[in-house]
């Protein structure tokens, strides 16, 4: 199990769990980040510290600080 920020660009991981407060976890779950869901890191933006993710054929952008709270299996 690793943090989402540890995946390389283009790598896929299966979501295992979410850390952080309840409101944060709920927001990510509403966006489709549910346990067992495959998540692909599309790319990282150097400016602003964000990751672009592909979840269920949708593209999401999350802050690096938030991505550290997402646990996946590569």
Image: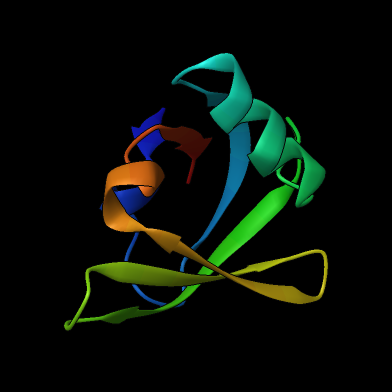
> Which colour assignment does the render follow?
rainbow
Residue 16 x %, y %: 60, 27
Q: Residue at x 38, y 44 (%)?
A: 66
Residue 17 in the figure: left or right of residue 1: right
Residue 69, above or below 12? above
Q: Residue at x 27, y 46 (%)?
A: 65
> Which residue extends farthest top?
22
Residue 47, above or below 15? below
The image quarter in which residue 2 lies: top left
Residue 8 x %, y %: 32, 67
Residue 40, above or below 4? below
Residue 71 in the figure: left or right of residue 22: left
The image quarter in which residue 3 lies: top left
Residue 31, above or below 52? above
Q: Foreground residue, 43 or 66?
A: 66
Q: Residue at x 22, y 68 (%)?
A: 49
Residue 1 in the figure: left or right of residue 35: left
Q: Foreground residue, 41 or 64?
A: 64
Q: Foreground residue, 66 or 42?
A: 66
Residue 47 x %, y %: 17, 83
> Which residue extends farthest left?
46
Residue 59 in the figure: left or right of residue 40: right
Residue 39 x %, y %: 62, 57
Q: Foreground residue, 41 or 52?
A: 52
Report how many numbered discs are placed on residues in the image.
0
Q: Residue at x 75, y 45 (%)?
A: 37
**Quadrant of image for the N terminus:** top left
């Amino acid at each position: 199990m690793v943090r989402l920020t540890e995946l390389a660009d283009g790598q896929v991981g299966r979501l295992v769990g979410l850390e952080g407060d309840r409101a944060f976890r709920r927001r990510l779950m509403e966006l489709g980040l549910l346990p067992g869901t495959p998540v692909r890191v599309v790319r990282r933006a150097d400016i602003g510290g964000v990751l672009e993710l592909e979840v269920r054929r949708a593209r999401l952008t999350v802050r690096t600080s938030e991505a550290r709270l997402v646990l996946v299996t590569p």
